[in-house]
Image (cartoon, rainbow, N blue to C red):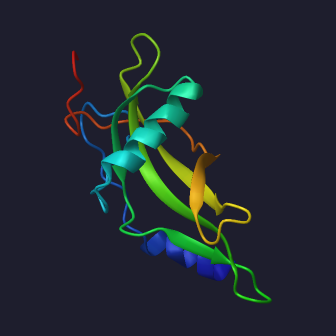
Amino acid sequence: MAFAVMLLVLAPALPTVRGQAPGAAYLPREGRRDPALKAQMTKLLAARGIRPVEIRIIEPEWQVERAPDDGAVRARTINAAVVYRGAEGAGLLMRYVLFRSEPSRGRGLRFDDLFIADLGKPRPLAKGTVRAPGG
């Protein structure tokens, strides 16, 4: 308990920027450029009603999940920052989305199907972070 109190006292206050929404998100740097993967991500997001303005894959490589007993690959995941237009008047929003792919059965170690493992929470995007088409 004392440790947590000490952290609160020692942690500097987060700076606020005039004109920004509280908790505004800043778009992270791109870690990987992969147009084919971004096209798959766009399709999956569209199926959930999200039309991305920009997708940035923020990890340079897939994160591999292995079975603890034999080390076999169970799945691989990768994170992306997704910018999209919110409801009328809401401006641009950003979510961190976790995409997951599992190996195909009986075809060796091939990853065919990509799906959304975690859609993340929408946050307002800080002004001037990205330029939206038509906006």
Q: Is residue 26 visible?
A: no
Q: Quadrant of residue 86?
A: top left
Which residue is depicted at the point 70% across and 87% down?
A: 71
* Residue at the far right in the pictured view: 69
* Residue at the far top in the pictured view: 88
Residue 21: % across, % down: 37, 33
Q: How many marks?
A: 0
Q: Quadrant of residue 61?
A: bottom left
| Placement of 107 over or under 66, stated as above or below | above
Query: Looking at the rendering, in which quadrant would you find the N terminus?
Result: bottom right
Which residue is depicted at the point 31% across and 47% down?
A: 35
Which residue is depicted at the point 56% across and 41% down?
A: 121
| Placement of 105 over or under 135, stated as above or below | below
Q: Is residue 88 visible?
A: yes
| Placement of 77 over or under 112, stated as above or below | below
Q: Horizontally, is 5 left or right of 69 in the view?
A: left
Q: Horizontally, is 79 left or right of 55 in the view?
A: right
